[in-house]
Image (cartoon, rainbow, N blue to C red):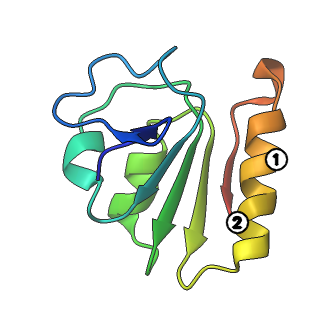
Amino acid sequence: YAPVRYGVDVDGDLGDLDGKYDLIVMSYPYCSPIFESRKKVSVPVIALSDMLNSNLINMLTNFETSFCMIKPLDFDKFKATVKFVMNLKLADRGVFKIV
């Protein structure tokens, strides 16, 4: 459930996410313990989940820009979403979408 940066798993306390990562891709519910207590974070997040529920929606509201994709993934749609998120300008952030 730890974010990956340049192919290396980051374990333990994530501390300050802002500025360390450009994108976080997480699998729900495995990531929930580490993200439930986060304050508002500006790092874009793509959550991968088997289902939608209020806990996931509430967790995603802690991020300025978040996307939720339901498994099984359409890999082409996933790639397009990652590309879209990485091309977002800072002024365009602040969205929440279920893809």
For the residues labelled 1 and 2, the Cα–Cα distance comes to: 10 Å
Point out residue 63 in the picture as x, y percentages from the top left corner: 51, 35
User: Could you tell me which residue is drawn at 58 percent across and 32 percent down?
Assistant: 64
Kind of residue sitting beneath label 2: Phe
The residue that disc 1 covers is 84
Q: Which mark is residue 62?
A: none
Q: Going by the image, does 94 lie left or right of 5?
A: right
Describe the element under mark 1 as helix, strand or loop. helix
Point out residue 45 in the picture as x, y percentages from the top left corner: 54, 44
The residue that disc 2 covers is 78
Q: Is residue 2 above or below residue 6?
A: below
* Front residue of 11 and 46: 11
Q: Going by the image, does 33 lie left or right of 51?
A: left
Kind of residue sitting beneath label 1: Phe
Q: Going by the image, does 64 lie left or right of 6?
A: right
Classify mark 2: residues with Cα within 10 Å, few (<14), some (14-19) or many (20+): some
User: Could you tell me which residue is drawn at 27 percent across and 19 percent down?
Assistant: 15
